[in-house]
Image (cartoon, helix red, strand yellow):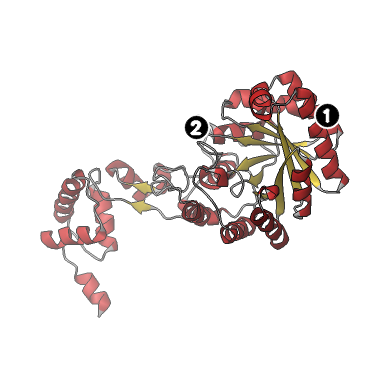
Amino acid sequence: MEFFQGTLDSTSEIDEARIFDTTLRDGEQSPGTSFSYEDKREIAALLDEMGTHVIEAGFPVNSDAEFEAVRDIAASTSTTVCGLARVVEDDVEAALDSGVELVHVFVSTSDVQLQDSMHATREDALSRAVESVERVKEAGVECMFSPMDATRTDESFLIEVVEAVSEGGTDWINIPDTTGVATPGRFEDLVGTVLEHTDARVDVHTHDDFGLATANALSGYEAGAAQSQVSVNGIGERAGNAAYEEVVMALESLYDVDTGIDTTKITELSRLIEEKSSIAVPGNKPVVGANAFSHESGIHAAGVIENADTFEPGVMTPEMVGAERELVLGKHTGTHSVRERLTEAGYNPTDEEVRQVTRRVKDYGAEKRQVTLDVLERFADEVGVDRTRVEEVSV
């Protein structure tokens, strides 16, 4: 569909948009979530098949099992695989030994985390950051550096750290909104400031504590970041991360950016993560929720039957994400949906029969009961709707 005039008539804000998936690392840090070795391999294989630019496979120093999983994913996928490391020698060496193509080193830079989590000074953090970046580059491996809690870091110190690791040779600087306190405008300004002080490429990592993770990730792109870190279904620490499916589809559909991602597998990917993480996808979840392309309201359903663009975005269709549109029957259903569903089931109702069945559907749905196909067929039979066509087809 062509872009509408108005809010969607200008789509030139973003030139480049790479996707860094952290489902296997930050996503797994969701309380109660643990991916097995087999889970990680299966998830990574699908992310790779879809064309995800970077897969952060885990934290290699964490355990022998984690190290093996990261190493095997790095060896078995064609995409860039990343391993996380604190600015600690053992962490960095474990990441290098795992064979990943990208080592992601991080250190806290906000005073609150330095004082009450790391128990270190700014000087300690700065020197260890530079040493770790230099070690990764000395090994001939691509490096990403993250000043953790960047959005709560004193800006002058943040710039000092960014300039130091840039001089140390880091390829990427990630700007993390670790506690989800950024707002889109402020975050865009921060990303722009960082870009003014480094020649490294920039990506962003946003959390959803205030429901702004996807918006902040997109504002990062608009400011000039080349990449954002996302997780499937938005899982991750606390309220989670920017959601893979939301960021990708916003880029593709609202900004008209070709991410290179095979979006037709997004629903499949979401269902896989839902199964492996045991975190249910809410029905109203954007892009992948059960209601994302479902319609019950009579006015909406009637419009969609005529032209799906009437009450759907138009620039994003269920087919684009590997989903299906559904007309849900219930309290708010109108005659158009009932006629459509009856016809699909092989009935040939009159206008009066459609009205009678619709009344039964509304009453049934008002009692918070689900109107399944069996229930609809029972109503049709009670009203006496002709089903001769089905008998003819079955002969």
Residue found 19% across the figure and 68% down from its top = 387
Residue 146 shows in this picture: yes
**Residue 297 falls in which quadrant of the image?**
top left
Residue type, numbered disc 1? Ala
Q: Secondary structure at mark 2?
A: loop
Q: Secondary structure at mark 1?
A: helix
Q: Exactly how many numbered labels are in the figure? A: 2
Residue type, numbered disc 2? Gly
Provide the residue designation for mark 2: 211
Q: Position of residue 49 (x, y in %)?
A: 63, 59
Q: Position of residue 241 (x, y in %)?
A: 56, 39
Residue found 56% across the figure and 30% down from its top = 180
Residue found 16% across the figure and 53% down from its top = 357
Q: Position of residue 22 (x, y in %)?
A: 62, 46
Q: Quick one: which residue is furthest to the front in this view?
A: 119
Q: Which mark is residue 122?
A: none
Q: Position of residue 332 (x, y in %)?
A: 25, 43
Report the side of 31 relative to 129 (left or right).
left
Provide the residue designation for mark 1: 164
Report the side of 371 relative to 61 (left or right).
left
Residue found 16% across the figure and 58% down from its top = 379
Instruction: Name the quarter where the C terminus is drawn.
Output: bottom left
**Residue 298 falls in which quadrant of the image?**
top left
Report the side of 136 relative to 267 (left or right).
right
Foreground disc of the pair 2, 1 = 1
Depth order, front residue of 383/114: 114
Q: In the rendered view, tell whether residue 121 sits above or below residue 277.
A: above
